[in-house]
Image (tube, helix red, strand yellow):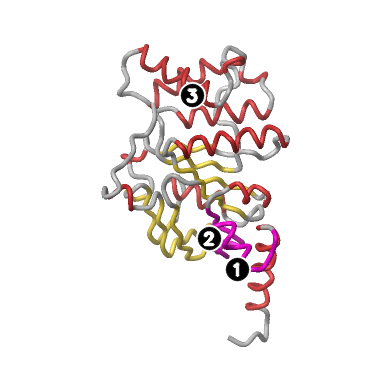
């Protein structure tokens, strides 16, 4: 099942997948997100890049409606973040595996299909959906393997398969390639691009800067703030650098210089 294409003049065709304005999250007395604003266009891969601890996971939790103490504006697919109507429209993959290790791959997906797709009462419909996502993540040869016996890369793909049930319009992926070898990372990114060809929007967080080159658009974060929002090509051109990593470091240096003691406004 693929997402139906939207007519160019329809509201969904022009409304961004995600829109944030003055988005702030406070944990205890410490601000984790500091009044950031951005948009995520539909049908593209937007990379959320930045070092560990900069607020990426907090931002993703706010987007899917599981983060407390969020202020500002945050809309997802035209609805307030966390709205009940978004449950079947947004797929979310956390850093930690979110599947049952004592079940097989197919048993996990059968269970989550019954929970996440309650409107599909017919067993044969759910079975077709399960087989589709198993094929999407290239786990057909391991469908009846116990999930706890899979490699780290295979386990990540099972979590991704769960998020793909029901063909969500937006996929939110928190560090989906962390700890994977280069071949598995390449294969996952190829899958991400195939999903956008179907019309799916992806927001992918990472602290690995070379993955930025695989994205259509980037959000570069540091210390709860947004350093830049642009395409990889535009960022390299703007900073006169050869890589996104070099562009990021230049932006960090510029931000540090601007906030150094004694700096004139």
Q: Residue at x 56, y 43 (%)?
A: 174
Question: Is residue 123 depicted above or below 129 in this figure?
Answer: above
Dot 1 surroundings within 10 Å: few (below 14), some, or many (20 or more)? few
Mark 3 or 2, nearer chain start: 3
Dot 1 or dot 3: first in sequence order is 3
Q: Residue at x 31, y 17 (%)?
A: 121
Helix, strand or loop status at disc 1? helix
State the CA–CA distance, disc 1 to disc 3.
Answer: 40 Å
- Would you place residue 77 above or below residue 256 in this image? above
Give the residue displayed 26% in from the left and 50% down from the top: 9
Q: CA distance from mark 2 to mark 1?
A: 10 Å
Q: Find the distance from the CA under tag 3 to the CA under tag 2.
A: 31 Å
The image position of residue 86, as x and y in percent, is 35, 40
- Depth check: 16 or 222 in front? 16
Asked if the residues shown at circle 1 and circle 3 are in contact, with their CB atoms under 8 angstroms apart, the answer is no
Question: Is 103 on the left-hand or right-hand side of 186?
Answer: left
Q: Is residue 144 above or below residue 179?
A: above
Residue behind mark 3 = 133
Numbered mark located on residue 238 in the image = 1
| Mark 2 vs 1: CB contact within 8 A | yes
Residue 49: x, y in percent? 60, 53
Q: Position of residue 26 (x, y in %)?
A: 50, 60
* Residue farthest to the right, as pictured: 181
Q: Which residues are magenta?
A: 217-242
């Amino acid at each position: 099942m693929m997402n139906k294409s939207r007519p160019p003049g329809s509201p969904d065709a022009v409304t961004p997948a995600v829109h944030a304005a003055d988005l702030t999250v406070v944990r205890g007395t410490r601000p984790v997100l500091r009044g950031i604003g951005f948009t995520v266009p539909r049908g593209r891969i937007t990379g959320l890049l930045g070092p560990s601890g900069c607020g990426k996971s907090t931002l993703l939790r706010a987007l899917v409606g599981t983060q407390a103490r969020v202020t500002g504006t945050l809309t997802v697919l035209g609805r307030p973040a966390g709205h009940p109507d978004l449950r079947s429209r947004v797929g979310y993959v956390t850093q930690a595996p979110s599947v049952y290790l004592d079940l097989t791959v197919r048993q996990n997906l059968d269970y989550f299909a019954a929970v996440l797709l309650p409107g599909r009462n017919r067993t044969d419909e759910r079975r077709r959906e399960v087989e589709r996502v198993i094929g999407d993540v290239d786990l057909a040869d391991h469908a009846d393997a116990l999930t706890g016996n899979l490699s780290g890369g295979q386990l990540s793909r099972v979590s991704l398969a769960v998020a793909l049930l029901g063909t969500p319009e937006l996929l939110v992926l928190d560090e989906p390639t962390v700890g994977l070898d280069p071949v598995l990372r390449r294969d996952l990114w190829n899958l991400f691009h195939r999903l956008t060809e179907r019309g799916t929007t992806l927001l992918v967080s990472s602290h690995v800067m070379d993955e930025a080159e695989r994205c259509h658009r980037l959000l570069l974060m540091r210390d709860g703030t947004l350093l830049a929002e642009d395409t990889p090509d535009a960022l390299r051109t703007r900073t006169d650098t050869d890589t996104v990593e070099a562009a990021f470091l230049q932006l960090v240096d510029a931000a540090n210089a601007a906030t150094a003691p004694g700096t004139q406004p």
